[in-house]
């Protein structure tokens, strides 16, 4: 009896004990749809042409890790009725920030998390050692650059944020790129992928590196679920020279004069409203709707 009781106590303690972080290797192989898979030569080309750090990873549209199954449905964008398992349960995201970052880099990432916690009803909380699903915010060496899985994949999943080096700030010049990748992890796609984008921007295939033209595909019209106007200044919009053959040859330009495509400083008003709408923050109550509309209006770029 005493032995059985001791065994029960030991088992309970083991179950209640926080789990150790999984080992994160320097080189990882995130899923890439077959249509967007690149050869080592193509990946080297991205580095040689000095592309944006969101382009360098060579994943789908540069910085998004997707399975073939997700790629078959990527045009559904934000529709949880098709892929409900990709939503973070109870609007809660556990995270770990790698100890490999120095203090200033850690603060940059943490400020991005604080921004999302303040402007949305989604709560990023430090991993308690027990939650099965959580983000590992980590400076993996390959794929190089800034990238993330799209939505919740289950288990620990990487958000890769490359720290500054002698070439430049990479993903951590300020909190904008961290926010961009965290929004991918929440389930947001790039703005220029919208089905209606041709009404607002022109794509210039003659300037795009041929192997990467697939990254300029757009969602199908029947699957479009956006409730907000096209946002040139979205933190999720491509820059003007992404995947360009040469730095002075734009791959995407606005139809509207005097606007800049994309930015990586902070969420725009539309970005803020979009993520709140996606996770039902605007539907909780009249109070919550007024609260988040007000925050997005005054705090969004």
Image (tube, rainbow, N blue to C red):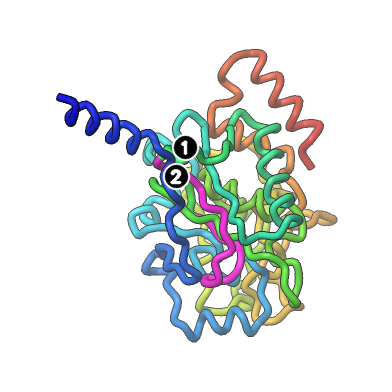
Give the position of the N terminus as an image quadrant.
top left
Q: Is residue 155 above or below residue 130?
A: below
Q: Is residue 115 above or below residue 41?
A: above
The disc placed on residue 282 is: none
In this picture, residue 123 sits left or right of residue 34: right
Q: Residue at x 65, y 68 (%)?
A: 53
Q: Residue at x 67, y 14 (%)?
A: 287
Q: Residue at x 57, y 83 (%)?
A: 45
Residue range in magenta is 132-148
Q: Residue furthest left?
A: 1
Report how far apart the C-alphas of labels 1 and 2 lie in the structure. 6 Å
N-terminal-most mark, 1 or 2 = 1
The disc placed on residue 152 is: 2
Q: Position of residue 228 (x, y in %)?
A: 64, 37
Q: Which one is nearer the viewer's eye here, 159 or 6?
A: 6
Q: Residue furthest right?
A: 258
Q: Is residue 139 magenta?
A: yes
Q: Position of residue 261 (x, y in %)?
A: 74, 57
Q: Secondary structure at mark 2?
A: loop
């Amino acid at each position: 009896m005493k032995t059985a009781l001791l065994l029960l106590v030991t088992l309970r303690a083991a179950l209640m004990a926080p789990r150790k972080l999984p080992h994160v290797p320097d080189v990882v192989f995130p899923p890439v749809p077959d249509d967007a898979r690149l050869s080592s030569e193509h990946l080297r080309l991205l580095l040689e042409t000095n592309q944006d750090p969101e382009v360098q990873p060579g994943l789908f549209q540069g910085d998004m890790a997707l399975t073939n199954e997700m790629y078959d449905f990527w045009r559904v964008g934000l529709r949880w009725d098709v892929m409900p398992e990709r939503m973070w349960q109870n609007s809660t995201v556990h995270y770990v920030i790698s100890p490999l970052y120095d203090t200033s880099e850690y603060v940059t990432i943490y400020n991005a998390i604080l921004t999302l916690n303040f402007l949305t009803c989604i709560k990023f909380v430090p991993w308690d050692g027990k939650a099965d699903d959580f983000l590992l915010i980590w400076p993996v060496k390959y794929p190089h650059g800034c990238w993330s899985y799209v939505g919740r994949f289950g288990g620990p999943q990487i958000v890769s944020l490359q720290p500054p080096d002698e070439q430049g700030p990479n993903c951590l010049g300020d909190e904008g790129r961290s926010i961009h990748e965290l929004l991918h992890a929440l389930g947001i796609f790039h703005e220029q992928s919208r089905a209606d984008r041709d009404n607002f921007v022109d794509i210039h295939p003659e300037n795009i590196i041929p192997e990467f033209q697939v990254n300029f595909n757009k969602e199908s019209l029947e699957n479009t679920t956006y409730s907000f106007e096209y946002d040139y200044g979205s933190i999720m919009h491509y820059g003007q020279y992404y995947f360009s053959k040469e730095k002075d040859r734009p791959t995407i330009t606005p139809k509207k004069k005097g606007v800049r495509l994309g930015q990586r400083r902070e969420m725009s008003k539309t970005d803020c409203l979009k993520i709140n709408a996606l996770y039902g923050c605007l539907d909780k109550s009249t109070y919550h709707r007024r609260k988040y509309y007000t925050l997005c209006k005054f705090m969004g770029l």
